[in-house]
Image (cartoon, rainbow, N blue to C red):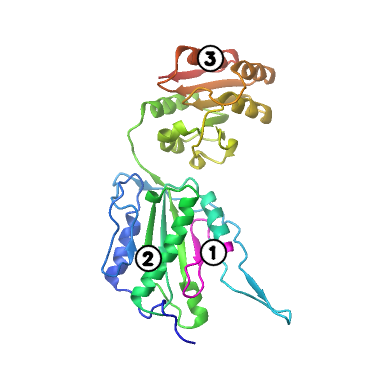
Amino acid sequence: MTPSKSESVRGMSTVRAALASIAVMLATPGCKSGNDIDTHSTSVTAATMAATPDCTERDMTGQFSPISIAAPEVLRYRDGSSKAVDLPNETDGETLTVYYRTNSDTLQSPDLADIAAFREQHRGATSWVLEGFADSRGTEKANVELAGKRVEGVAGRLTSKGISSSSITTVSNGEMMAEGRTVAEMAPDRRVTLRPQYFSCPQELTPEARVIVEGLEEMMPIEHLLMDLSGSMREELPVVRGFDTKDAEISGFNSCAGVADLDDLQQAEVCGETPLWSSILEVLNAENIDGLTVVTDGKNNRGTATASQVIALAKKKGVKIDIVAADVAYNDADKAELRSVANQTGGKYFIRN
C-alpha cells in the first residue's frame, strides 16, 4: 500500500510534547484570551492562555455515565457479509474520542451525533480541551496540519452548539502519540479527544448575584427550586452554577426553553425573557410539592398569566412560595406584587435592589 502523504513517520520531540502538555494545563476558565502558542512545528494552538492561579479544577470522576455511541457506517456485500467502515467512537463519560479515516478531517454522521450528545451531557462545563492526532505516515509538517484540521473541525461543531470559542483550547499533536505500524494498528492513531473541564474560580459578585446567594442561603432547606434563566441572568450564572442546593429538586425557566428540569445547577443555560408567572403555574400544576422557592432577577415580561392566578393555585394546592428577587430596575409596584405572592401563600421573601 502506498503511504498517505499526510500521516507522518516519526514522533515529535520531547520539547514539543511538553509544550502541548503546558497548553492543556493553561486551559483555565476566567482567563483573558491570549495569543495562540506557536512552536516552530506549529503543533500547538491554544484558545485560552493566561491561567488564573486561584481557579481549581473540580474532580468529576464517576459523575457522568457514557453516552450511547452512534453505530459507524457499515458496508454490506453481495455475499451477505458486512464490514464497518470506521472505528466506533469511544467514551468513558469524562472524555470522548472521535476516530477518522485515513488522510481525512471529515466528520461523519455518527461523529456529529456523538459530539452533539457529549456536548449536551457536559453543557455545564466551563472549558474544553481538544487534542488532534494523526498516524505515522507522511511528513511531520503535514501531519501537524491534518491533526489541526481535525481538531478545529470538532471545535467548530462545539461553537455551533453555543460554546464560546474563548473557552476551547485546541492542541494539534500530529503523529506525536502514534503507536500503530500496520494499517489496522494505525486506525486508533487518527483521532480527536474531547475533554470538558469544570473549574471553580473565586470572583467578585455583582450586586444581583450577592442578593441571590444571600436569599438562597436564607431559604434553605429548599424543596423545589425554580430558577430564572432568562438572558438578564448571564452575569449571575457562574454564581448560580456554584450554589449547593443540597437535595432540592431544580427547574429552570426562560422564554426559549420554557420550564425544564435540571439534574443540578451546573446544567443551567441562559436565554430569552422572563415568563415568570406562567412558569410558576406550570410547576404548580405539574409537581406535588409543599414548597416552591423562586429565584428571579427580573419582573414578568412574557405571557398572559398573572400573580393573582399564581396565588390562587398555590392556595388551592397548599404550596408555600418563597421569593428571592434582585434587580436594580424593580419599581415599588413590582416588589409589592412579589411580596404579595410570598405573603398570601405563607412563604417568605428576600427582595433587594
Q: Look at the picture and state if 102 lies above or below 108.
A: below
Q: Which residue type carries mark 3?
A: Glu
Q: Which residue type carries mark 2?
A: Ser
In this rendering, the count of numbered labels is 3
Q: Marks 2/3: CA distance?
A: 56 Å
Q: Marks 1/2: CA distance?
A: 19 Å
Q: Position of residue 103 (x, y in %)?
A: 46, 74
In the drawing, what numbered circle is on residue 337?
3
Q: Is residue 28 left or right of residue 219?
A: left
Q: Quadrant of residue 71?
A: bottom right
**Residue of label 1:** 90
* Segment colored magenta: 92-110
Which class describes the residues within 10 Å of circle 3: few (<14), some (14-19), or many (20+)?
some
Q: Earlier in the sequence, mark 3 or mark 1?
A: 1
Q: Residue at x 37, y 65 (%)?
A: 172
Q: Marks 3/1: CA distance?
A: 52 Å
Which class describes the residues within 10 Å of circle 1: few (<14), some (14-19), or many (20+)?
some
Q: Look at the picture and state if 179 lies above or below 313.
A: below
Q: Position of residue 291 (x, y in %)?
A: 60, 24
Q: Quadrant of residue 140?
A: bottom left
Q: Quadrant of the C terminus?
A: top left
Q: Position of residue 92 (x, y in %)?
A: 53, 59
Q: Look at the picture and state if 78 lies above or below 257.
A: below
**Residue of label 2:** 172
Q: Which residue type carries mark 1?
A: Glu
Give the secondary structure at mark 3: helix
Q: Residue at x 44, y 23 (%)?
A: 326
